[in-house]
Amino acid sequence: MNFKIRFATPEDLGDMLKLIQELAVYENEPDAVQVTLEDLYRYGFGEEAIYKCFVAEVDSKVKGMALFYSRFSTWKGETVHLEDLIVTKSMRGKSLGKALFESVIMYAKTRKIKRVEWVVLDWNTNAIDFYEKYGATVFKEWRTVQLGEDEINNIN
């Protein structure tokens, strides 16, 4: 199968949002997506752009994406955080995820970035196996910590 990996453009935002919604369903959080097309534009292509995204195209249609952004580590300097690697269900197992993941890795490598990081759900064994094939360490002792909108607003 032929496919193309490229940086996303504003024309891809609708497809990106559909993939994000598909991921939410897969992760059993179908009502959790609050991001809008305007948000995706503003933070990916506007003056306040903070993320980058590769998309996988098959027959000129977006079938996958890898959204990532820079972070700063006091130990390593600039790092890359892979927020989401999504391939639509009908295209899984056809190397799109591998190509998207490797595009993020090559992006980091060309920038001499010392760490790429992401989170994976503990029940997503297919993803864990996929990442471990690359030599990734899946930490069991680290916990993801978050404050939600309500908690943020309740802090004086």
Image: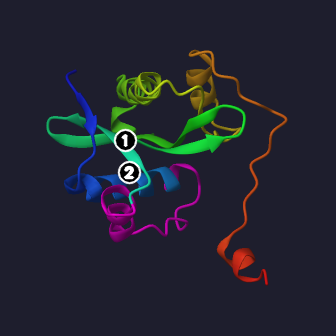
Percent position (x, y) of residue 90?
34, 37
Q: Is residue 149 above or below residue 103?
A: below
11 or 1, nearer to the observer: 11
State the quadrant of the C terminus: bottom right
Closest to the camera, between mark 1 and mark 2, is 1
Name which quarter of the figure residue 135 lies in.
top right
Disc 1 marks which residue? 65
Name which quarter of the figure residue 98 lies in.
top left
Is 76 left, or right, of 40 in this rendering? right
The span shown in magenta is 25-48
Q: Is residue 15 magenta?
A: no
- Residue drawn at x 37%, y 61% is 40
30 or 105, nearer to the observer: 105
Task: Measure the alpha-carbon separation of dots 1 and 2.
Answer: 8 Å
- Residue drawn at x 78%, y 80% is 155
Percent position (x, y) of residue 136?
64, 21
- Give SS at disc 1: strand
Disc 2 marks which residue? 19
Q: Is residue 32 above or below residue 95?
A: below
Q: Is residue 31 magenta?
A: yes
Q: CB of mark 1 within 8 Å of CB of mark 2?
A: yes
- Residue drawn at x 41%, y 23% is 110
Sooner in the amino-acid sequence: mark 1 or mark 2 = 2
Q: Total of numbered circles in the picture?
A: 2
Percent position (x, y) of residue 58?
21, 34
Percent position (x, y) of residue 11?
19, 55
- Residue drawn at x 56%, y 16% is 134
